[in-house]
Amino acid sequence: EPEVTQTPSHQVTQMGQEVILRCVPISNHLYFYWYRQILGQKVEFLVSFYNNEISEKSEIFDDQFSVERPDGSNFTLKIRSTKLEDSAMYFCASSNYATGEGGEAFFGQGTRLTVV
Amino acid sequence: QKEVEQNSGPLSVPEGAIASLNCTYSDRGSQSFFWYRQYSGKSPELIMSIYSNGDKEDGRFTAQLNKASQYVSLLIRDSQPSDSATYLCAVISNFGNEKLTFGTGTRLTIIP
């Protein structure tokens, strides 16, 4: 069964360093997303990406964050200068449509980012 | 602020019984509704999607949607210990707006 894959599963970084989280969405999906979940809190939307551009972003997704689809398969989230409060599980997701039947989003296994 | 509300639990249900999970949402224009299961330390796993009023059944799971009451529920029949997890209700608010808004989740424990 097709699945979303994320690497690495766990990333430890020093405050102020740049990190890149990588995702391979399901191959025929068109919409790609990043969500994050701080320990003990709800899953929060960061950004959605369609047709090679950001279609929506949340207040969390400030200038420190960027996304890219560098080739036909990968989808990356870059955090330029990490802060302690960026420590969270980051989930990549993809869907075939934006909404309605077929718009179900499937999540990768997540990357646990720890900023020290 | 578009909100999705769930009782955080924990909800304890005996094995073999029916577990009932509830969710309310604030945006009356919401179009798409989902239930995800999340085991501790793992990612959300899609269980059910529902788009129109009424019931939708898939195996032991039934999702129920009432748009007039802004209420969506998930019933799990013949509950198994492996159903013990946090269940997340998620909503897409408007047509063309594809982001999911999640509730805080209900922690379900199935007691053998």
Image (spheres, coloured by chain):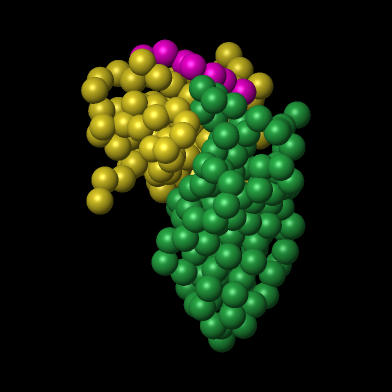
Chain colours: A yellow, B green
Please name the residue shown 54% across and 19% down the image: A56
| Predominant SS along the magenta part | strand
Does residue A59 show up? yes
For the point 66% across and 21% down, which residue is it? A59
In this view, the residue in front, A64 or B31, is B31
Q: Over which residues does the magenta segment extend? A: A52-58
Q: Position of residue B41 (x, y in %)?
A: 52, 56
- Where in the figure is residue B44, as x and y percent of width and height? 49, 50
Numbered label tally: 0
Judge left or right: residue A26 versus residue B98: left
Residue B65 x %, y %: 61, 50
Query: Any magenta on residue A53?
Result: yes
Picture quadrant where residue A61 is located? top right
Q: Is residue A31 left or right of residue A24?
A: right
Q: What x and y, as percent, mark residue B48?
A: 48, 53
Which quadrant of the rendered structure holds the C terminus of chain A? top right
Task: Note whether B35 is above or below A115 in the view shown.
Answer: below
Q: Which residue is depicted at the point 61% across and 17% down?
A: A62
Quarter residue A93 falls in: top left
